[in-house]
Image (cartoon, rainbow, N blue to C red):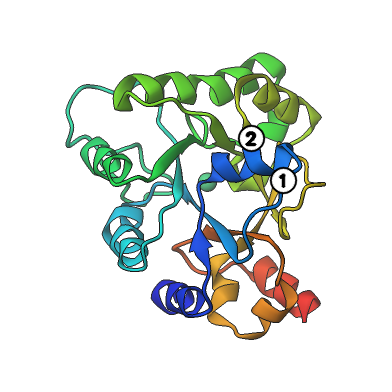
Amino acid sequence: MLRSGLARLARRGYRSVDLLDAVETLSAGSPLPPKSLVITIDDGYESAYREAFPALQEHGMTATVFVTTGHRAGRDPFERLPPIEGQPMVSWRELGEMVGAGFAVGAHTLTHPDLTRLGESEAEAEIVGAKAILEDRLGVSVQSFAYPRGKYDQQAREIAARHYNCACSDRLGVVTRASDKYALERVEMYYFSRRPIFDLLATPLLPAYLRFRAVPRNTRRAWARLR
Ligand SMILES: [Zn+2]
């Protein structure tokens, strides 16, 4: 699904642009080149390195990988990020290799909680703590954030807005100049394995969101509505 979706995008002339560059361009009121695509990958499963990284590179594309760091990171480069739902995650060394190849890293909280169920100080610790760990561990500036499972409320949005340049939600759609940069819409990669999506989403900026596990039922329902 990933490879066929990427191949289809590349064949149609889509090029990946960096998330922060795209947000900056749109914020300045400037248009993006046609067929621009921002690719984001949530969670940092090991498959992001093993499958998505080479597949994207094959097509000259890059992505922003949003990772969940845990409360602290040691110095062992082979240490893996803490598992989400038992899935194996990328190691710090693998993440560093992706950064070295032009991929960006964004924060995705410390422990992947439902931010809408947390008080302000807990939510702030989750949202900001991950940024500090990533910047320390990878030596890069981290300016983008993704809400776990795309879930956010006014409180989470305000905290994200204080600390990041943009935040991604899972709201299905394309980003336009009118988009809230702290609740950016995305489209699951699943859709790109289907031809009709291109006709529906022929807009300047198409942010895609890669998932590696089974497509949840609600995504199928969203797809049915789109058709
Ligand atoms: Zn996630």
* Mark 2 surroundings within 10 Å by alpha-carbon count, few (fewer than 14), some (14 through 19), many (20 or more): many
Closest to the observer, 135 or 86 = 135
Counting from the top left corner in percent of width and height, residue 185 is at 70, 52
Q: Quadrant of the N terminus?
A: bottom left
Query: Pointer 2: what residue?
Result: 166
Closest to the observer, 95 or 108 = 95
Counting from the top left corner in percent of width and height, residue 138 is at 31, 28
Query: Pointer 1: what residue?
Result: 30
Rendered residue at 44%/51% (across/down): 63
| Callout 1: SS | loop
Rendered residue at 55%/20% (across/down): 128
Q: Is residue 203 above or below residue 133?
A: below
| Callout 2: SS | strand
* Mark 1 surroundings within 10 Å by alpha-carbon count, few (fewer than 14), some (14 through 19), many (20 or more): few
**Residue type at numbered disc 2:** Cys
Counting from the top left corner in percent of width and height, residue 74 is at 24, 22
Q: Position of 97 compared to 182: left or right?
A: left
